[in-house]
Image (tube, helix red, strand yellow):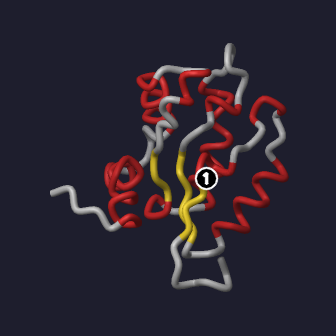
Amino acid sequence: MRALPEVRFVLDHCGKPRIIDGDIDGWRRQMVQLAANENVAVKLSGLVTEADHANWSELDLQPYVQVVLDAFSPARIMFGSDWPVCQLAATYDEVVSVTESLTALLRHDDKVAIFGGTACDWYGLDVT
């Protein structure tokens, strides 16, 4: 990524942290290192399938979402549902709902970026 600063990279599923194992430290270090590259964005997706499929909660996901929010700006974070794979652990509606809840305290403009604006920018989409 450093060798190709003109290329935009998108890390899918937040790099698939092992939420079920509770191992956040090594993953956090890697996320901070990746975020240092301005040409890297991250999809806020795939977290429910990395947690305990039958017993995950918003509290399980919160520290991982916070790492992403702290490391990357909303201009480099994009929501992804991971549908249909998310159905191993949650419905599409549950994934949307928990992500909205975990980002509820953000400014309106930051939520707009995460829930569509960043993807439009990074993929060159015009949805107007």
- Quadrant of the image for the C terminus? bottom left
Q: Residue at x 43, y 27 (%)?
A: 97
Hey, which residue is sitting farthest front in the picture? 84
Q: Residue 78, relative to residue 104: is it above or below?
A: below
Q: Residue at x 61, y 84 (%)?
A: 4
The count of marks equals 1
Residue 64 picture quarter: top right
Residue 70 picture quarter: bottom right
| SS label for mark 1 | helix
Percent from the top left, x then y, of residue 23? 84, 40
Percent from the top left, x then y, of residue 123? 38, 64
Percent from the top left, x then y, of residue 78? 46, 52
Task: State left or right for residue 8 relative to residue 35.
Answer: left
Task: State left or right for residue 123 relative to residue 43.
Answer: left
Q: Residue 65, relative to residue 2: is it above or below?
A: above
Q: Along the line of sight, which residue is nearer the eye, 10 or 59?
A: 10
Q: Residue at x 21, y 56 (%)?
A: 127
Q: Residue 46, relative to residue 49: is it above or below?
A: below
Q: Which residue is mark 1?
A: 68
Percent from the top left, x then y, of residue 17? 73, 43
- Quadrant of the image for the N terminus? bottom right
Task: State left or right for residue 58 relative to residue 53.
Answer: left
Q: Residue at x 47, y 43 (%)?
A: 80
Q: Residues within 10 Å of mark 1 (few under 14, many from 20)?
A: many
Q: Amino acid at mark 1?
A: Val
Hey, which residue is sitting farthest left in the picture? 128
